[in-house]
Amino acid sequence: MKLQKCMRYNNPRVWHRLPAVTLRFLSPNQPRQQRRFASQSQPPRQYRPLETLENVDISHFRANYFAPERPILLPRRSFRAFPAFERWFQPSPTDPNVSQLNATYLGQHGADAFVPLELTQLPSDGTVEAGADGLTFRQFHAPLSLFLDWISTAETLETQSTRLYLAQCQLMDLPQVLRNDFPTPQLVAQAGKGDVYDTNVWIGYPPTYTPLHRDPNPNLFVQLAGQKIVRLLSPEDGQKIFGTVRRQLGMSGSREAAAIRGEEMMQGQERTLLEKAVWDDATAVPGLEGYEARLEAGDGMFIPRGWWHSIKGVGTGVTASVNWWFR
């Protein structure tokens, strides 16, 4: 889930008012004009369940997963001790199994912090130019208070036609009191070189989506609230899928091209083809195999350097994650 720092705007203190248009979201069953990657006679690719460790021994993890670069699910709910679990989230008053964002706490300690946001929308009146799939996508920086206001409103609606996603918010951009809610896990401090390259927080309402990409650093990914599904592919297989899509679009399919989560990957034809290539088994690139993992609050997984992955937030209530990149 590595998003390059070059995505930050030259003037991060400038943010834009959300457009006042009536919006709706695509139904997952809505037909799309897409080129199929394989004929119906080809067997679909199977994403096998990712292995789960029963317990964590740092030496065992380092020797069997970190050093050989093998993905693994850590013991279920083993990351529930972070202070952020109790301070950033609270049970929904209507369903104790659904999480809400504690906007009061975050507003008290970080309302003025400028954070990266992603706006996804679908215009219904035809006045806004959109991509091939009808979605428009924007990245911008704004005060955290804007996101808190939106998410408080979204909690009262059955459907959210405009979606904001707090995506790859660097922990260092938040006030110290909020940073203290995410102490570095022992796995990160002891398995690698002992320091952290970067730590990022992700918060939104499902469905959230991160396109297929790979990270240049090993990654500990922890689910804080809600649920996410992760699909992983080896460096070789992921490159085949990514290169296939990019070449269809007449663009570079090099490894470097997938290191940036740019607007072209989040809307239009590239989003459509990438998402279908990874998530639609009926039209998958033949001969490739990958892994799938469903994470709930407190679950963590290790994503090795160079392993390709795409992530979807699912279910109800807020979905939130934090990840540490090993140095």
Image (tube, helix red, strand yellow):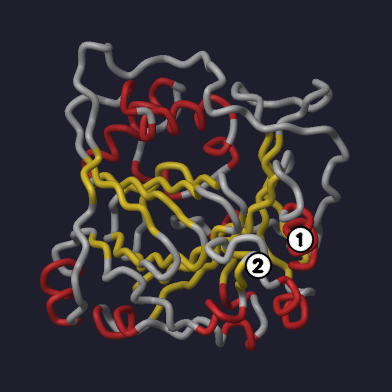
User: In this picture, is 250 found above or below 172?
Assistant: above
Residue at horizontal 53%, vertical 77%? 85
Asked if the residue under mark 2 is in contact with the one under mark 1, i.e. CB atoms within 8 Å, the reply is: yes
Residue 180 vs residue 147: left or right?
A: left
Badge 1 amino acid: Ser
Residue 286 vs residue 308: left or right?
A: left
Q: 117 or 250: nearer the eye?
A: 117
The quadrant of the picture occupied by the C terminus is bottom left
User: In this picture, is 243 found above or below 224?
Assistant: above
Q: 192 or 108: nearer the eye?
A: 108
| Distance Cα–Cα, label 1 vs label 2 | 8 Å
Q: Is residue 149 visible?
A: yes
Residue at horizontal 32%, vertical 85%? 186
* Disc marking residue 152: 1
Give percent across and percent down for residue 90.
Answer: 62, 72
* Disc marking residue 101: 2
Residue at horizontal 39%, vertical 76%? 79
Badge 2 amino acid: Leu
Q: 166 or 139: nearer the eye?
A: 166
Snapshot quadrant of residue 280: top left
* Disc marking residue 286: none
Circle 2 Cα neighbour tier, 10 Å, few/some/many (<14 / 14–19 / ≥20): many
User: In this picture, is 318 found above or below 128?
Assistant: below
Q: Is residue 327 visible?
A: no
- Label 2's element? strand
Work out whether mark 1 precedes mark 2 in sequence or the reverse, and give the earlier one.
2
User: In this picture, is 38 found above or below 64?
Assistant: above
Residue at horizontal 66%, vertical 39%? 137
Number of numbered discs: 2
Give percent across and percent down for residue 86.
Answer: 56, 80
